[in-house]
Image: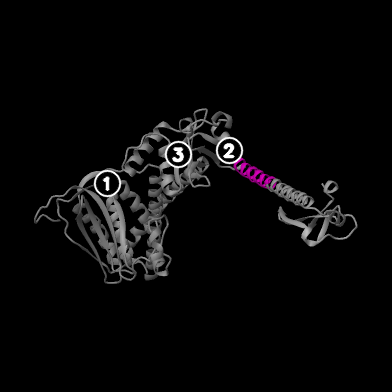
Amino acid sequence: MGDALRLTETILHGDVVYFTDKSSGAVPPANWIIETSMRIGEQSWTLRIAPTAAFVESQKSELPSLVLVAGLLVAALSALSVRYILISRLKSAHLAKSLALNAGIISSSAHLVIAIDSQYRIMIFNRAAEQALGYSAAEVTGRRAIPIFMDPAELEARARSLSEELGETMAVGPDIFTRIPLRDGYEKREWSFIRKNGTRFPVNVIITPLRDQDGAVSGFLGVIEDVTLAREMERMKSEFTAVVSHELRTPLTSIRGSLGLILGAMSTSLPAKVRELLEIAQANCERLVLLINDILDVEKFSAGQMRFDIQSVPLAQVVGQAVDAIEGYARKFNARIDASPIPAGWRVAVDPERFIQVMSNLLSNAAKYSPPGGTVRVWAEQRAGTLRVNVSDEGPGIPGEFRTRIFEKFSQADSSATRAKGGTGLGLHIAQRFIEHMRGHIGFDSMPGAGATFWIELPAVEVMAAAGSAA
């Protein structure tokens, strides 16, 4: 182009000339010079095009000027084209690197990663999924995900539970996986996966929707964790705890009995110091027995070995038995139990032994945390189709930061006063598990410094308004 039109071309980066085909000679007038700037990558470059001074002198008509302008425009367009091509190549390179990185992350992930498109066909099936399920990516890509490695019985159960939750009929299909993620943004749920060879393993599945640049749902991503090892570790821990607890409970029971015998039959002949030490030993033994019994209850429940004998019983009867069992304990704290009469016709479906255990825990906690001379109040009330039993104390109440975890295992409020009262931190957790198994609810109301009221709510089996018939 420079030879044909007697033009000079110069490429600059800042003030540095990287290329020029200009020969020595006078510099043409500034109005004959055309410059265009462009960015390539992160660098700014300048393309300068100008006619030679001799060419300018030789051109006296308008036609050469028009030709010159046309040539300069062509050069500018060429520069823009080069810039566009370079930018496109840079973007393609970045995109390729990003895709390669994502593919590497998905492929090397220890979790199973399965993605489906908007038609519920599998489009990503990573190496961990291949190894865990026994299918190759080629076998499953493009197929609908649900029938391949899911348990039909679990799918039916999920459809039923989701129908109850949403208040509409849900059939087995993709909606049982995608309805909640679309509503809440994600869903985490346990499932059983079936390998190609027919064996099963438990998994935790997190499903999230995938959206395109316009926000429309383009598919769903499933990140799956194989929890076989975690389940096995939990089972081994439970067995170990149960064995140790059983081995400890037998000698502790014998020690407790011996200490009780000594303090009962021989207490008058014991020196005061010896009696004091024996009483401390007996109290510590009682705490250890309580802890072991609580641990065994938790492990039995977790292992599905806890048996419940559900019966229709008068509420007044089981509440009264619990109050009678705790009155002696409450006297140790100089607390009094005030139980209001409960109509004899109020009945609930519970395991009497387990219900009394729960009530005893609530009553003993209320007695422990009541001030000396305080009163623990017990009353029942009828609600819509349910009966509620309340246990209130006059203690310090429940700290705000402790309320969300009060029913967790080994949970106790972090205060010196609470630690001084003792306890295993398992009683309320066990109480919640028992009551929920009996189709009830347990909760509390409390204001700091104004005591606490724990309540148990159970479905009423029979509520008969019997005037004057109260226990």
| Residue at disc 3, secondary structure | strand
Q: Which residue is mark 2?
A: 128
Residue 324 image point, x, y percent: 23, 58
- From the image, state whether disc 2 or disc 1 is nearer to you: 2
Residue 102 magenta: yes
Q: Is residue 286 above or below residue 152?
A: below
Q: Give the mark nearest the N terminus, 2 or 3.
A: 2
Residue 174 magenta: no
* Badge number at residue 59: none
| Predominant secondary structure, magenta span | helix
Q: Measure how far apart labels 2 and 3 are at the Cα level.
A: 17 Å
Q: Amino acid at mark 2?
A: Ala
Residue 214 seen in the figure: yes
Q: Amino acid at mark 1?
A: Asp
Whether label 1 touches label 3, CB < 8 Å: no
Q: Measure how far apart labels 1 and 3 are at the Cα level.
A: 31 Å
Whether label 2 touches label 3, CB < 8 Å: no
Q: Which residue is mark 3?
A: 191
Q: Quadrant of the C terminus?
A: bottom left
Q: Give the mark nearest the N terminus, 1 or 3.
A: 3
Residue 250 image point, x, y percent: 40, 49
Q: Give the mark nearest the N terminus, 2 or 1.
A: 2
Q: Quadrant of residue 443?
A: bottom left
Whether label 2 touches label 1, CB < 8 Å: no
- Give 204 or 119, whichever is nearer the viewer: 119
Q: Which residue is mark 1?
A: 351
- Give 155 or 394, whichever is nearer the viewer: 155
